[in-house]
Amino acid sequence: RASDHVRLVEVGPRDGLQNERQKIPVDTKIELVEKLAATGLTILEAGSFVSPKWVPQMANSSSILEHILKTPPSSPEKIKYQFLLPNTRGLDDFLNTYNAHAPTSTPDSSPASTPSPTEPPEIELSIFTAATETFTRKNTNCSIAESLSRFAPLLSRARDANLRVRAYISVALGCPYEGPDVDPHKVAELAVSLLEMGADVISVADTTGMGTAPRTRELLKTLAAAGVEAQDLALHFHDTYGQALVNSLVGLEHGVREFDAAVAGLGGCPFSPGATGNVATEDLVRLFESLGLKTGVDVERLAAVGEWISGELGRPNDSRAGKATLAQ
Ligand code: HMG
Ligand code: MG
């Protein structure tokens, strides 16, 4: 892994859309994924297999997975697609579609590492728990301990199926129900448990955007002291209070090289009242490139996707860098 490279995980199609009240046609979601795939982004979270009673907007995620497997979007780089799951029921639903449509063997046509447009996409899973009991109950109707017990069989079955798993820890820097002072040791304890259980990466999430630079620094130090290495971490900032860019810089200084974001700053969690979207991917690209780090993303193309999806949803484009890029 080149130290001058930052991995961006585009969560717009999942985190960005899950909170929209109006029903978004599946064709629009697929078009969003295809447009994002053409920008140079290499990791896209494309949907979730959660209860449709809880999050109706994600109900057609299996159609998106099917489309990705049958007609991989063309992209300049090989893309990994992620799907979010809360439990083994979600895994069963995911595997039904995955096993029905995943190519059985990888075509070995080109000897070089250059990705071929026909190469089958790689699929990963993501799971989620939270650092406070109240948020875990509101989001997944169980305690933190119960959420970990749900993950144990899920992680072992994912391993059997050769699927990498990313684990989110929500409300790591503030909880809508318990306030901003979430215990960083609780986050670290959860991160250690999830890594021991077999999660490949921990995405530490500021669901409410309450995080500040000093508290982000404190959290990252606490994680390091507990033995969680920067390479095992991603950061997932929502930008409710406009602190996501500065908090990302703190993450970079601590060695983190994986960041989640949503095009046009889409998003929010249905179980985090008042929280707004993820940090805009366009804004993060501009920050990282200004520091000499490479993202592989064509920011003009990305800005155009942000403007397009904002228009489709009838919402303002929340990326400052995206709007300014388009106005140039
Ligand atoms: P529950 O109601 O306690 O579950 O929900 P249950 O096991 O009692 O099942 C209730 C019904 O849901 C049953 O159906 C199940 O079959 C069904 P019924 O018999 O009533 O017809 N069910 C499912 N259906 C589809 N897919 C499934 C599934 N599981 C059960 N996987 C549950 C528990 C976890 C399922 C529910 O609370 C849930 O789906 N929650 C989803 C919450 C969610 O998606 N939140 C947003 C994503 S997380 C997020 O945004 C944060 C993040 O971005 C990071 C950050 O910013 O913090 C990742
Ligand atoms: Mg989120």
Image: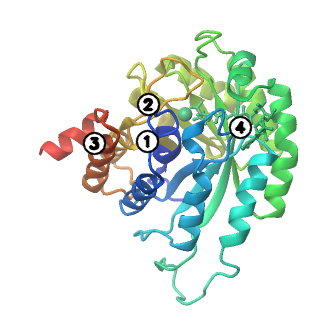
| Residue annotated with mark 4 | 228
- Mark 1 → mark 3, Cα distance in angstroms: 15 Å
Q: Are marks 1 and 2 in contact (CB under 8 Å)?
A: yes
| Residue toward you, 280 or 25 | 25
Q: Position of residue 290 (x, y in %)?
A: 30, 44
Q: Earlier in the sequence, mark 1 or mark 4?
A: 4
| Residue toward you, 133 or 200 | 133
- Splitting the image into four quadrants, where does ligand 1 fall? top right
Count neighbours of disc 3 (C-alpha within 10 A) and say few if under 14, some if 14 to 19, many if 20 or more.
few
Q: Position of residue 47 (x, y in %)?
A: 57, 49
Count neighbours of disc 1 (C-alpha within 10 A) and say few if under 14, some if 14 to 19, many if 20 or more.
many
Which is closer to the viewer, label 1 or label 3?
3
Q: Are marks 3 and 2 in contact (CB under 8 Å)?
A: no
- Mark 3 → mark 2, Cα distance in angstroms: 16 Å
Outermost residue toward the left in this view? 328
Residue at 68% x, 41% y: name it: 50
Q: Amino acid at mark 2?
A: Gly
| Residue annotated with mark 1 | 262
Q: Earlier in the sequence, mark 4 or mark 2?
A: 4
Q: Amino acid at mark 3?
A: Gly
Q: Earlier in the sequence, mark 1 or mark 3?
A: 1
User: Would residue 53 appear left or right of 291 to someone viewing this image?
Assistant: right
| Residue annotated with mark 3 | 311
Establish if 97 lies above or below 242.
below
| Residue annotated with mark 2 | 277
Label 3, secondary structure: give it. Answer: helix
- Mark 1 → mark 4, Cα distance in angstroms: 25 Å
Q: Earlier in the sequence, mark 3 or mark 2?
A: 2
Q: Residue 67 appears in which quarter of the rendering?
A: bottom right
Residue at 28% x, 32% y: name it: 316
- Mark 4 → mark 3, Cα distance in angstroms: 41 Å
